[in-house]
Amino acid sequence: KPRSASPSVPAAESKRVRLAPLRFLWPYALRYKGRLAAAFVAMLAATGATLAVPMAVRRMIDHGFGPDNAGLIDSYFTMLIVVAGALALASSSRLYLVTTLGERVVADVRSDVFARVMTLSPGYFDRTLSGEIVSRLTADTTQIKAAVGSSASVALRNLLMFIGAMAMMVATSPTLSATALAAIPVLVLPLVAVGRRVRRRSRAAQDKIAAISAYATEAIGSVRMLQSFGAERRTADHYRKGALEAFGAARSATAARAVLTAVVIFIVFSAIVGVLWMGAQEVLRENLTAGALSQFVLYAVFAAGALSELSQVWGDIAQTAGAAERLSILAAEEPDVASPASPVPFPQPAKGAVRFENVSFAYPAEPARPVLNGVSFMVEPGATVALVGPSGAGKTTIFQLIGRSYDVGDGAVLLDGVDVRHADLAALRERIALVPQDTTILAASIADNIRLGRPNATDREVVEAARAAHVDRFVMALPEGYDTVVGERGITLSGGQRQRIAIARAILKDAPLLLLDEATSSLDAESEAHIQAALEHLMADRTTIVIAHRLATVVKADRILVMEDGAVVDAGTHAELSARDGVYRRLAKLQFHNTATAAPED
Ligand code: ADP
Ligand code: MG
């Protein structure tokens, strides 16, 4: 399956920071209004306490050092201790409230996005690397956790502090404030210029890291295959190259950040020195007391500190906006295939009758390459139809269309007379039991893996299905029997064992339409002979379409459809088709010959 390696969400290429995507997070934060309000109150209290300190300092300098003022000094110091206590309490409450808010919001965002990903159609996963989705769920949500749990509160706190300190500066000395205010643009402009470069570079670094994470996820998922081709060195080298590129990008971002720090420190200190110098002139001219100047300078330091912290979290906020944007796109992703608003109910009782009406189809990943061309056929209720044809003919695709993993391009697929696009998806899939060509086994217990066929099945039903599919033969040898977790402590299953679990799932599901996609291809002759009996028992009282790889199955089918290059080129019974000199005879000779001898003769 060709899948594009390019991210489905374009890396933010614009230079301008867009904060609008942050709106995505707002409803999540609003779920916790109480916590949000309490955090805000704690923040206001902490800011208020900090802003009270310079006032105490001024009183102390201007009035406290006179003769006989020891009592006054004591009361100022007592006041400062009380302020310190209030500040400590307010800050720790804020930390707790805001951090837990971040954790909670991220838990909610992750769950919602994951739930949405689970609903997306196979077509989405054809075009998106799973590593990329995982990176959305981990890296991007971690970024948001940091933002909600820290950067946002740092930003708000410093904004409050900046406004409060500015107001107090004006209250202390309007003239000095006017000069300080006039200096602000001079301070801010270089910060903005350097800050922009920092942002651009750290975004590039982030993209590089996301790319190698996605690569690692894919490589780890297929490490056995890579090793079998001796590709582990090449894969590791590729990863190392990516990691070094990520380092290069991070180093360049850090260099820009270092320049920013130098600029900030120099500008802020010069500004404070400038204000102090001008204030000193005012004190000399006796327009200002020494205490008032101290108070003013402290507020100026607070304001400048708040401003520089704001400029630093700005980058975080911008990155968070990027993460929120990617997550909001993923959260809003609509499945290509969904239930209609008012589904047509299936007739009861279920028959499992299938009808293809002039179906044409191309996979969304390759829309220009037709896979099915005007396929029409009918499967009568209760019949067994074999689908044969060379590999790549489109047999598996037929099954994907019946279960509506994809929608047809043209024509229609009907199950029990209802166009599958008009039916409720869950109701449709309830009527179908599929044994796929490649079985996926979950990292769960064997019992749970089988129970996927019918979640409310009793333990006894699970074991019965397992016995019929000859799963019990190898399960008995496992340390914890049916409770053995696949994937743990080195428990892996062979292809044949997986296939038997898939058959057990289908037996347990007991659906009216059975779809077998080369269902016994990975089994040894003996297991196959045993399971064949179970399958035949299953097929006896329901409609079955079987993609056949062995002659015995084909011979027994009520009808055989011969496929080639995405079209049904012939149909009939084994006897009829063998009599004709066509694709079937060639297939029967080449493809079925080997397996026919392994099949039990009857
Ligand atoms: P068969 O089961 O008869 O061997 P398939 O139905 O699996 O054939 O495949 C038919 C064609 O569709 C093949 O050319 C295959 O490469 C292509 N194909 C299968 N799955 C996908 C997919 N998910 N995306 C794009 N092309 C696909
Ligand atoms: Mg196939």
Image: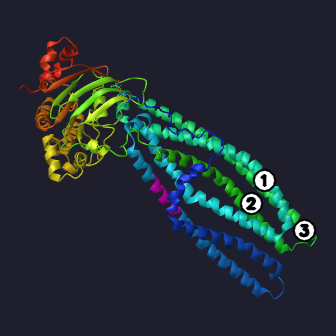
Label 3: which residue?
A: 282
* Circle number at residue 187: 1
In depth, the one of 286 and 237 nearer the eye is 286
Q: Is mark 1 within 8 Å of ligand 1?
A: no
Q: Is residue 240 left or right of residue 83?
A: left
Mark 1 vs 2, N-terminal side: 1
Q: Secondary structure at mark 3?
A: helix
Q: Position of residue 152 (x, y in %)?
A: 60, 58
User: What predominant SS class does the magenta segment belong to?
Assistant: helix
Label 2: which residue?
A: 304
- Measured along the vertical axis of the image, is residue 316 above or below residue 510? below
Q: Is mark 3 within 8 Å of ligand 1?
A: no
Residue at the (23%, 47%) spot, across then down? 446
In depth, the one of 281 and 317 nearer the eye is 317
Mark 2 vs 3, N-terminal side: 3
Could you give the CA–CA distance between mark 1 and mark 2, rounded to whole angstroms? 10 Å
Dividing the picture into quarters, in which one does residue 357 lie? top left
Q: Are marks 2 and 3 in contact (CB under 8 Å)?
A: no
Q: Residue furthest right?
A: 285
Magenta residues span 99-109
Q: Position of residue 112 (x, y in %)?
A: 43, 52
Residue at the (25%, 36%) spot, across then down? 417
Amino acid found under the numbered disc labelled 2: Ala
